[in-house]
Amino acid sequence: MVAKPVKAIVRWLSPKEGGRKAPPSGPTYATVAGFGNAPPSLEEAWSLVLEFESEPDAELKHRVRVQFLSPEAPQELLHPGSHFQLYEGSQLVARGEVQDGQKE
């Protein structure tokens, strides 16, 4: 069974913080996510898919729906209050927090 997306807030790092030049512009975005304090290793890497629900605000925060790309991913990592980081290669580009549980 594939889990439904959960709502989250993602804050993109500015170029001064080592992030992207600008937040992604598409309606969806997929990249590797980390769930600890260090970048994920190849053995523990999972990709997340974000669907944007709003434009980023002045603080580069986005309201999103997020889910794992793979149905085999550890769904329990996306619970209300959990934190994740988004990477492009080894570059940390954003941090996120799950706001609430699965939505219909």
Image (cartoon, helix red, strand yellow):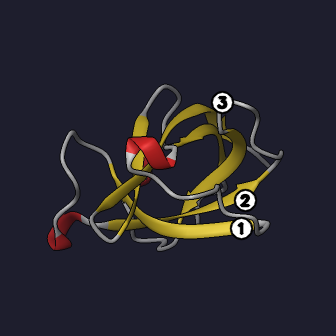
Question: Residue beneath label 2, please?
Answer: 51
Residue ranking furthest to the right: 54
First in residue order: circle 1 vs circle 3: 1
Distance (Cα) linking label 2 and label 3: 19 Å
68 to the left or right of 28: left
Question: Residue beneath label 1, please?
Answer: 28
Distance (Cα) linking label 1 and label 2: 4 Å
Badge 3, how many Cα within 10 Å: few under 14, some, many 20+? few
Q: From the viewer's side, name the closer residue of 45 and 4.
A: 45
Q: Residue at x 62, y 38 (%)?
A: 8
Question: Residue beneath label 3, please?
Answer: 59
Task: Find residue 9 and report its image quarter.
Answer: top right
First in residue order: circle 2 vs circle 3: 2
Find numbered disc 3 in the image and state the secondary structure of the residue it sits on: loop
Q: Is residue 65 visible?
A: yes
Find numbered disc 1 in the image and state the secondary structure of the residue it sits on: strand
Q: Position of residue 47 (x, y in %)?
A: 43, 68
Q: Which of pointers 2 and 3 indicates the residue nearer the eye?
A: 3
Q: Is residue 1 visible?
A: no
Q: Amino acid at mark 1?
A: Thr
Badge 1, how many Cα within 10 Å: few under 14, some, many 20+? some
33 to the left or right of 99: left
First in residue order: circle 1 vs circle 2: 1
Numbered circles on residues, count: 3
57 to the left or right of 24: right
Q: Amino acid at mark 2?
A: Glu
Find numbered disc 2 in the image and state the secondary structure of the residue it sits on: strand
Q: Position of residue 34 (x, y in %)?
A: 32, 52
Q: From the viewer's side, name the closer residue of 56 and 67.
A: 56
